[in-house]
Image (cartoon, rainbow, N blue to C red):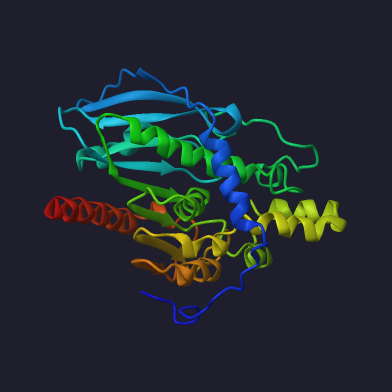
Amino acid sequence: MIDERWKDYIPESNREPDFDAFWEETKLESKNQPLEVRLSDIPYPIRNINAQKLIFKGFNGTELAGFYLKPDSEKKRLPCLLVLHGYGGNKGSIANYAKYLMMGYAVVALDTRGHGESGNGSYPAGGTGSWVTQGILDPATYYYRHVYMDVIRALDVTETLPEVNSERIVIYGVSMGGGIALAVAGLDNRASYVIADVPNMCDLPLAIQLKMEGSLTAVEQFLRQYPDQLKQVFKTLSFYDNKNLAENISCPVWISAGGKDLICPPQTIYGVFNLIKTNKNINYYSFSGHDLPGSISHIDHLVEILAEYIEERVTKS
């Protein structure tokens, strides 16, 4: 289902002149930093799950933590889900990923920096106690610069895992994780598919104007404290807004949006969706809020999509 109100909505770009150069320099800086990957076994009571703790160095040396999970079989070249959680959350329980392992996927589930078991790094003073405002007065020091690079580095790690088919890495994110998934696909072409549930970081000026809850309300709080920084804050955010990255996405994309979502307003998601040029689908749920990804029908639909992706790739290979 598509909401007719926004099917033709195209947000105005606010790319800075040095947008592309900024990201090329950032990616080069990240590439030159060591990963220092460590894996250690996790005893787990569910049979047929091979679980390991994954540790590696994120951007600028911050230590990041996650799970590397495999079906307990001898199969190689597995498709892999790189899973990104929402703001304030974490990678959760190993059991949450059992359905994907049963389908034949490997899973890399990452704790975003500052969340779960991952470190946070250091940022200039002046935030509001929320990650979304850390370093916000300069694109080069902003929290999400580190986060986007962390996930690109997670792709670097995932490609090296011997059981994983590096040509079949699916990035799946929810809320903040969905926004990061889209951004990473706009900065790096290695993902073969992106699934972004109720994604954040979309059309940020409009999102800040429309949203009533969620992480971006901290930006409003910051601007109430520092009203003279309005122009600089929105300049920084422009480098991290998916409306300025969406046209670079080259893999298929599947997005969801909820009509009653007060955290990631559906119009902002449609704006980014409409800019994506590759194969894409959007599932719009008129009466769902930000809890949409947890609904039974949506979970079943996600499993169906992942099963179809495996079947399609197997048929073509």
Q: Is residue 88 visible?
A: no
Left or right: residue 152 versus residue 211 is: left
Q: Position of residue 19 (x, y in %)?
A: 63, 57
Residue at 48 percent of width and 56 percent of height: 186
Q: Residue at x 72, y 58 (%)?
A: 235
The reply, left or right, for residue 264 in relation to residue 192 is right
Q: At which x and y percent is residue 43?
A: 31, 17
**Frontmost residue, 18 versus 54:** 18
The spot of residue 152 in percent (x, y) is 47, 41
Count of picture labels: 0
Which of the 4 quarters of the picture holds residue 216?
bottom right
Check the image and report above or below for 212 versus 76: below
Instruction: Reply above or below: 110 against 234.
Output: above
Quadrant holding the N terminus: bottom left
Q: Is residue 126 above or below residue 223?
A: above
Judge left or right: residue 258 versus residue 105. Answer: right
Q: Residue at x 65, y 61 (%)?
A: 212
Q: Position of residue 69 (x, y in %)?
A: 31, 30
Q: Nearer the viewer, residue 244 or 144?
A: 244
Task: Return the residue found at the far left.
Answer: 315
| 251 left or right, relative to 76 | right
* Between 34 and 107, the one nearer to me in the picture: 34
Image point 57% across, 58% down: which residue?
263
Residue 79 visible (yes or no) = yes
Q: Nearer the viewer, residue 147 or 85?
A: 147
